[in-house]
Amino acid sequence: MTSVLDRPDEFGRFGEFGGQYAPETLMPALKELTITFEEAWADPAFVDEYRHWLRDFVGRPTPLQHAERLSERLGCEVWLKREDLAHTGAHKINNGIGQALLTERMGKPRLIAETGAGQHGVATATAAAAFGLECTVFMGSVDMERQHLNVVRMELLGCEVVPVETGSATLKDAVSAAMRDWVTTVDSTHYSIGSVVGPHPFPWIVREFQRVIGEETIDQLDGRKPDHVVACVGGGSNAMGIFHPFASTGVDLIGVEAAGEGLDRRHGAAIGGGSPGVLHGSMSMMLQDGDGQVLEAHSISAGLDYPGVGPEHAYFAAEGLARYVSATDEEALFGVELLSRTEGIIPALESAHAIAWVANNKDALHGEMVVICLSGRGDKDVDSIAGLGSAG
Ligand SMILES: *Cc1c(COP(=O)(O)O)cnc(C)c1O
């Protein structure tokens, strides 16, 4: 039986969330993309080619590693799903490859994307280079500064990086700029969105391209069932990728949002500190004021610095299929240091939110088995961490 857990309904909704709140000019492209993806995902040749790229280019499966020293330190059994070891250093490439294959299938020569931390931009630029596609990435000028390394990587890969100066000059503004470009270039261009956000069919497509994370984890657990699966939530693609195959199995799914300076101050916790509304083409939870004006998010990690969250997460929260907690900037810095020094792995600031939440809740987790999605590696963050003069 097909349920909303397999795919959204015909209007692209997960319960009351999701949908298509998009300009008329984009509706034909969204329709074309829905049909293309439906056909591609049911086509064994397409799925084979996607799997081939994941294996030989991305380096999948990524390991599920027992973090022994961290487990000893915290008193629970911690396993790390090592997305940081995927090519380009984060889970984003799983989606990047899938979207490039869709672009090719639609016969479009150009890919565009938005990026926050730069990881989705790098993943898109990488896939574009590997498939011989033209590539333009929109990035907030604030993010270009704090993620300079990734700007250089994208340019080396032959991609044009367009600075976005509007609003807070971060991820939300980059998404808006990419959507504005797409409205006028839709005949030749595919918009590869970087998370489980945006109008239908994007949240569904990106989840399907990321669910390999959870499927591999289940295989690698070899029949063992974890008590908890923990992942950081920005737009929510690494979290939905690992959560979805575990949904309805009785495993406690925990999404960790960015509490920034604290939930009573500036933060990025759309579920924990937001309310229902429409942002970037779908109905979900978001940060907004009493008049429905989008509020600026804040997180130390550019990848979690977004005032919205994917509609399927809003649905999971409303239905109690997962629970959503948060970790502050300061806790994330502690998480970076903890994993670096116990395991010899420098995590991305985003992933460090999940590490920090587990460490802070070690008493409640005592003796239990916890799988953490280590969504990416921290090389991109070392300059900004050093600039803070903290984390040792
Ligand atoms: C982009 C990114 C995130 C946040 O995006 P999601 O869609 O919530 O996964 C988290 N971790 C890393 C390493 C990222 O690059």
Image (tube, helix red, strand yellow):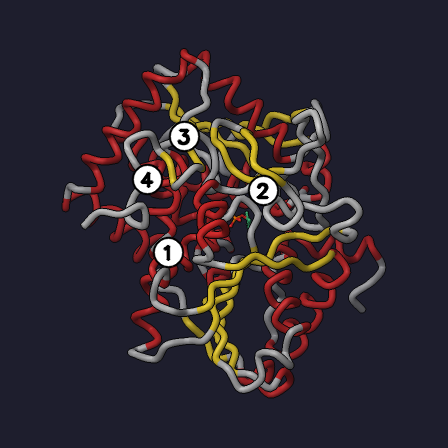
| Distance between the alpha carbons at the discs numbered 2 and 3 | 27 Å
* Residue 333 rendering spot, x and y as whole percentages: 73, 62
**Secondary structure under the numbered disc 2 in the rendered image:** loop
In 3D space, how far apart are the residues under numbered discs 2 and 1 (Cα atoms)? 25 Å
| Of 131 and 6, the residue lying toward us | 6
Residue at x 30%, y 78% (from the top left corner): 222
Q: Position of residue 239 (x, y in %)?
A: 48, 55
Dot 4 amino acid type = Pro
Q: In this rendering, does residue 155 appear at all?
A: no
To which residue does mark 4 refer? 8
- Residue for badge 3: 19
Q: Position of residue 207 (x, y in %)?
A: 38, 46
Would you say the residues marked 1 and 4 are in contact, meaning their CB atoms lie under 8 Å apart? no
Whether residue 157 is situated above or below residue 209 in the rendered picture: above
Residue at numbered disc 1: 244
The answer to whether one can see residue 371 in this image is yes
Query: Closer to the observer: label 2 or label 1?
Result: 1
| Amino acid, disc 2 | Gly
Determine which of the numbered discs, if any, sits on residue 283 in the image.
none
Residue 19 image point, x, y percent:
41, 30
| Mark closer to the observer (1, 3) | 3
- Residue 360 image-quadrant placement: bottom right
Which of pointers 2 and 3 lies earlier in the amino acid sequence? 3
Q: Which mark is residue 118?
A: 2
Give the amino acid type for the residue marked by disc 1 in the picture: His
User: In the visual, does 283 lie left or right of 245?
Assistant: right
Q: Nearer the viewer, residue 27 or 146?
A: 27
